[in-house]
Image: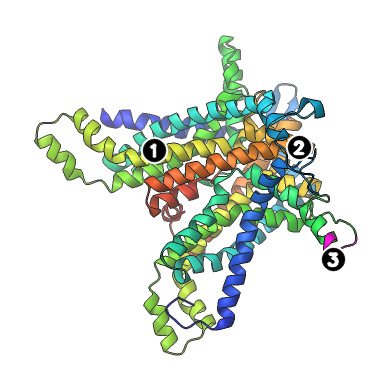
Amino acid sequence: MIASLPRPAWLRAATALYLGAFLLFLFVPLTVVAVFAFNNAPYPAPPWHGFTLDWFLGNPAAGRVGLFRDAELLGSIWTSVVVASWVTALSVLVGTANAFLMERCRFPGKQLLSVLMLVPLVIPGVILGISILAFCSRLAELADSLWGLDLDFLRPGLVLVVLGQFSFVATIATLMISARLKRFDRTLEEAALNLGASQAAVLRTITFPYLRPALIGSAAISFLMSFENFNTTLMLVGEDAPLTVLMYGRMREGASPVLNAVSLFLMLASALLALALMRTGRRGAERTAATAADAA
Amino acid sequence: MMLAVLLTPALLWLFALIILPHVQLALLSFRERIAPHTYAASLMQYRTFFSEPLYWGVFVRTAIMSALATALTLLVAFPVAWIIAKVARGRASSLLFVLCLIPFWVSETVRALGWLILLRESGVLPTLLVRLGITAVPVELLYHNATILVGLVYTSLLFMVVPLVSSLESLDNSLIEAAYNLGAKGPAILRQIVIPHAAPGITSGCIVVFMLTLGNYLTPNLLGGKNSQWFTELIYTQFIVRFNWEQGAAFGFLLLALSTGMVALGLRVSGQRFVDVMRRA
């Protein structure tokens, strides 16, 4: 019952109980991940054997490779960063072009195009992955048989991972940037033009500064979604595994607390990113961001 | 000129990465290898699916489990959304909302790792149960259907809470007060005022959650182990392990058809437009 109406005591108690249980449900899994990054035992499982930083710093004497010395893990983080940077750059660029296209232009078939742009969000990530895999392989075969070209980048690998992630992240960037451009007061541009500013100057000094929060927000979300993507990436990955794929492989072999250590950093990084975005954005923007964050 | 410049990236993106790959996938699924490097058009891949109980069994199971997970997510998320939108005020409401979002900024891999540590036989919860004297020996809490459902609900919560909160926030409190003053009880208010008003949010949330659950791979695979039998795993096996792309493509289309079908059904039932639902989500 809403706050302005009388609520019986049992209802208040039930609400508090439910809320407590809900918050436990939300945070216990994340808490155990963080806690067992510091447990002095080879498996992330109880009982507690005392505090250690071995899983970060390593301890050659005990045969423990810490996160900071785990070349494979650090390499995969770097791979994820490179992939995410490409996906972000492409998505924000294409998203901006799409926003101007949908908000400023008129052309036949616009309605159809606007629906098409949403489609990548309703295609399961696994299917986006296999369709791009199959298509690129077909292209590579054709190039080989027609011109004798060996187009290696069309084989499973990071280029395909970038394309696969970009294929749906672009939709989210488009939605976020369009939403802000839609609210823009065009009389500001007209005033500048009347006062003798060139088209380019108007874009640079008025339109883009206005769009900045959406550009930054969509860049952050694109980066996060790419960094955390698993489904699409799994289908397209070659020899260099991004972080999520590597972690998945290791979790299937049996988890080592090094994974907890790297997870702790991921949580901290995500929390910082979330805080930064919430400071710049209002609640509405925050919400778009939050929803987008996991669409993968 | 301007139009051409802006239209090019959009068309390149949609044709090269969405439309053409799916056409190619469709073509793959409708052919059959009759000799090395020789293919003929056929419906064999789809026939195999329907004649092999294992395949369609997993398909049906995935659909039912996804529907269950969606319903459970709605049940868990609705009270929280209600508290955020209607009971808590000001800062408390914002804080609660942000708390709900935090876990979803963290990778799904990390969330699955948390559940693994909690639920495996040597994990936190079985140990705790022994400590409390509830079970004599540690029980394996992983690899059950219930485990998969818990993981899926956990992963999907956000996509339900957000649309629910925004649809509940737009509900005018005075309507509820009026109903209350006229003598309506809680359940009647819920049924006659709250749910009809929140229906668009409920539909949006359910559609998105169902879709994501159906297409999930990581959570069922890690929490369900060999018992997960999720349809995306069959697709992965055909494509990556067995290299039987024709069969994998057919499976992909079947999953896509189910996903699209359910979205269309949800929209039809609630009388909403696709574009609006996606914008809201």
Q: Which residue is mark 2?
A: A256
Q: Chain of mark 1?
A: A
In-front residue for pair B168/A107: B168
Q: Name the amino acid type tagged 3.
A: Ile
Residue sitting nearer the eye, B142 or A157: B142
Residue B257 sits above or below residue A84 on the image: below
Judge left or right: residue B3 versus residue A216.
Answer: left
State how far apart marks 3 and 2 are (Cα). Answer: 29 Å
**Secondary structure of residue under mark 3:** loop
* Closer mark to the observer between disc 2 and disc 1: 2
Query: From this viewpoint, is residue A273 visible?
Result: yes
Residue at 57% from the left image edge and 13% from the top image edge: A146
Q: Say which residue appears at 51% left-offset and 77% top-offset.
A: B190
**Which amino acid lies under the numbered mark 2 shown in the image of this protein?**
Ser
Question: The disc labelled 1 sits on which kind of residue?
Answer: Ile
**Disc nearest the viewer among 1 and 3:** 3
User: Can you give x and y, in whole percent of width and height, for residue A260 in the image?
Assistant: 69, 40
- Residue at the disc numbered 1: A216
Q: Could you tell me if residue B262 is visible in this image?
A: no
Residue B191 horizontal side relative to residue B50, left or right:
left
Residue B87 circle label? none
Chain letter behind tag 3: B
Dominant secondary structure of the residues highlighted in magenta in the image: loop
Which labelled disc corresponds to residue B134? Answer: 3
Quadrant location of the C terminus of chain A? top right
| 10 Å crowding of disc 3: few (<14), some (14-19), many (20+) | few
Q: Residue at x 50, y 68 (%)?
A: B83
Residues drawn in magenta:
B131-136
Question: In this orientation, which residue lies closer to the viewer: A46 or B205?
Answer: A46
The x and y percentages for residue A131 are 59, 34
The Cα–Cα distance between marks 1 and 3, rounded to whole angstroms, is 51 Å
Q: Residue at x 16, y 44 (%)?
A: A187
